[in-house]
């Protein structure tokens, strides 16, 4: 496979769009404040989070940022009236102070949060909000089994360092942001996503996100064998109900920081 980790497939990601969009609705509902004039969606993906942002900030001039051309193309088709930019979050420079910066399921892929988060707060206007949601599921069986499959196979050397590791507890983010902000709200929610299709549906879910850095390093034959090993582990860890559905527990960390 020649795909790089930045080449996210919009079609794969949107297979579970309803479930993936619910957390950003919950986040933006909690981030309500003064009317936003300028809003940015960092890691906008195929535009589902941007569309939700527009609904919550209908009077704002909205910009979407993503480092995947495939995602940007999908977002432009969905929302042709919105400005989208192909850019890396860690190198992104705001054109003007932002009233609302949204980062939904994106910053977990960006390193050096100790520098990144204060830099994002610095791009806010007075009273502006940084609204962040990040998966907090590295201890869940779906992720543990991913790492085990990567370490237990002929591909182990290829896959060293492929897993997502940037992660801190809620207290760490609160301590980092509180001196820079007038208020910081941090909470954790575990969603239980019902998926049709048993453990195969879990594989399809993560093929749109966490599995991609692993699969990007493997050829087609290796990828198939890796997924077979991963799928076998999932069958021992998750209950498939009589109708073929499965519940995928998915903890997420939320942060709303007001400058």
Image: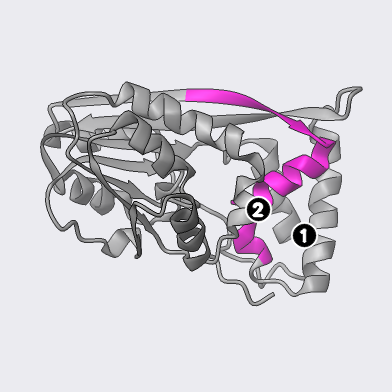
Please tell me which of labels 1 and 2 falls first in the chain: 2
In the rendered image, which quarter contains the N terminus?
Answer: bottom right
Q: Residue furthest left?
A: 126
In the rendered image, which quarter contains the C terminus?
Answer: top left
Is residue 62 highlighted in magenta? no
Q: Position of residue 69 (x, y in %)?
A: 47, 67
**Residue sitting nearer the eye, 250 or 13:** 13
Q: Is residue 100 left or right of residue 27?
A: left
Q: Given contact means CB atoms under 8 Å apart, are the residues at marks 1 and 2 in contact? A: no
Q: Position of residue 108 (x, y in %)?
A: 44, 48
Q: Is residue 253 left or right of residue 156?
A: left
Seen in the picture, residue 148 relative to 182 is either above or below; the reply is: below
Residue at 59% in and 31% down: 250
Numbered range of the magenta stretch: 189-215
**Residue sitting nearer the eye, 234 or 21:** 21
The circle on residue 12 is 2
Which of the 4 quarters of the picture holds residue 219?
bottom right
- Near mark 2 (Cα within 10 A), the count class, few <14, some 14-19 or many ≥20, is some
Q: Is residue 97 left or right of residue 49?
A: left
């Amino acid at each position: 496979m020649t795909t790089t980790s930045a080449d996210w497939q919009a079609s794969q990601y949107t297979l579970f769009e309803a479930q993936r969009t619910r957390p950003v609705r919950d986040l933006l509902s909690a981030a309500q404040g003064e009317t936003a004039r300028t809003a940015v969606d960092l890691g906008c993906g195929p535009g589902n989070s941007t569309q939700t942002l527009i609904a919550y900030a209908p009077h704002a001039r909205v910009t979407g940022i993503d480092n995947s051309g495939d995602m940007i193309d999908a977002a432009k088709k969905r929302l042709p009236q919105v400005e989208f930019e192909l850019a890396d979050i860690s190198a992104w420079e705001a054109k003007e102070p932002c009233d609302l910066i949204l980062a939904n399921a994106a910053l977990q892929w960006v390193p050096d949060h100790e520098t990144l988060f204060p830099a994002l707060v610095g791009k806010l206007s007075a009273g502006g909000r940084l609204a962040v949601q990040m998966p907090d599921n590295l201890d869940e069986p779906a992720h543990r089994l991913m790492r085990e499959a990567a370490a237990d196979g002929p591909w182990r050397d290829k896959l060293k360092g492929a897993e997502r590791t940037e992660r801190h507890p809620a207290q760490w983010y609160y301590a980092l942001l509180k001196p820079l902000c007038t208020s910081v709200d941090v909470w954790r929610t575990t969603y239980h996503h019902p998926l049709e299709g048993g453990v195969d549906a879990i594989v399809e879910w993560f093929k749109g996100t966490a599995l991609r850095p692993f699969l990007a390093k493997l050829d087609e034959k290796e990828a198939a064998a890796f997924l077979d090993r991963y799928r076998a582990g999932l069958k021992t860890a998750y209950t498939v109900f009589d109708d073929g559905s499965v519940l995928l527990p998915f903890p997420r960390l939320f942060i709303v920081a007001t400058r």
